[in-house]
Image (cartoon, rainbow, N blue to C red):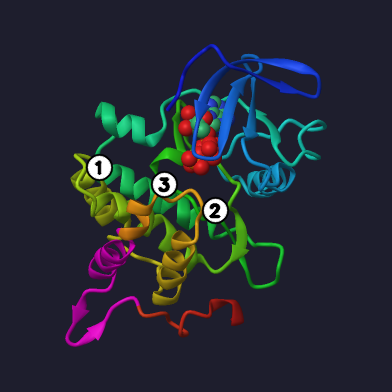
Amino acid sequence: MSTTGKTTGRTTGKTTGKLIGSGRTADVYEIDDAWVLRRDREDWGDAAAEGAVMEHVRAYGYPVPRVRPGDSLTSRTDLVMERLTGPTMLEALAAGSIGLREAGTVLAALLRQLHTIPGRRPGTRVLHLDLHPENVMLTPTGPRVIDWGTAEDGDPGLDWGLSAIILAQVAVDDQPIADPARAVLAALLADPADLTEVGLAEARRRRAVNPTMTPREVELLGAAEELVRSLAFPPQDGVRRGVPRDEGNREST
Ligand SMILES: Nc1ncnc2c1ncn2[C@@H]1O[C@H](COP(=O)(O)OP(=O)(O)OP(=O)(O)O)[C@@H](O)[C@H]1O
Ligand SMILES: [Mg+2]
């Protein structure tokens, strides 16, 4: 994460404060003690839609930063939201202030809680589709989920598939973080809940065409999918556990 204080962002004529965070697609600038500006670097997102989904899930008590009313819900690139304090889950893992198993359990609980919230299409649920340790901040009042640019309405199996395959891509690489990522993944999938074969296959397909992926990350997708499958659907008496209850199409129920 970049934490340089040299860069500033401009929003509707106002100069904002220092850069406090940066991901693959966005930069986050301080506005004041209460608010930050999240600015997409590319014009492919829809910040207004992102703010709307954050407010939708917050209305159901889901732990997300509050979106500032008024100036945030019209821009494609700029979103003004509540400033959170605390490390990301990845930073907390690196510092040893959260355990590997606890991290996986927290991610699973956040997915389960999210999927209780109805989407706007009948029969769907709200999906985050990028819920991993860099998109959870551990605040003094508990974990909060950030980075809602990929959110959609759909089937929870896809959200489980994406969280699992994102962790698995790290777990099958040859970096020092691989073993910790594998342990977090195993805890996430300890009770695989709504992970489905259909969701996992679609998650892999989406990762393969994601423009933020490096060639190396794409190359690791096959091994990542196999790792997820081995943890989530181990053969039992010749039958695979976790096969979708209704062939993966829960939207039809
Ligand atoms: N509401 C907030 N309050 C304080 N810091 C924040 C807030 N939102 C984001 N940040 C900081 O900015 C960083 C980047 O935010 P975010 O994950 O939204 O960007 P991104 O570019 O979409 O990330 P990704 O690489 O996952 O696509 C976070 O890791 C965090 O350090
Ligand atoms: Mg992020």
State the image coordinates of residue 190 (x, y, percent, origin top left): 27, 60
Q: What's the mark number on residue 132?
A: 3
**Rendered residue at 29%/49% (across/down):** 170
Left or right, 192 with respect to 76, comes to left
In the image, which disc is placed on residue 128?
A: 2
Nearest to the observer: residue 48 or residue 231: 48
Q: Mark 3 against mark 1, which lies toward the viewer? A: 3
Farthest-out residue, front: 215
**Residue at screen point 41% across, 63% down:** 161
Task: Tell me which label, 2 or 1, sits earlier in the chain.
Answer: 1
The quadrant the N terminus occupies is top left
User: Residue 112 at what x, y percent from top left?
Assistant: 46, 57
- Label ID, residue 73: none
Q: Is residue 223 above or below residue 96?
A: below
In the rendered image, residue 209 lying in the magenta stretch gets the answer no
For disc 1, the neighbor class at 10 Å (few under 14, some 14 to 19, many from 20) is many
Part of the protein shown in magenta:
220-242
Q: Secondary structure at mark 2?
A: loop
Residue 122 position by quadrant: bottom right
Q: CA distance from mark 3 to mark 1?
A: 13 Å
Task: Label 1: state its secondary structure.
Answer: helix
What's the distance in space between the residues labelled 2 and 1, CA to CA? 22 Å
Question: What element does badge 3 sit on?
Answer: loop
Q: Is mark 3 within 8 Å of ligand 1?
A: yes
Quadrant position of residue 48: top right
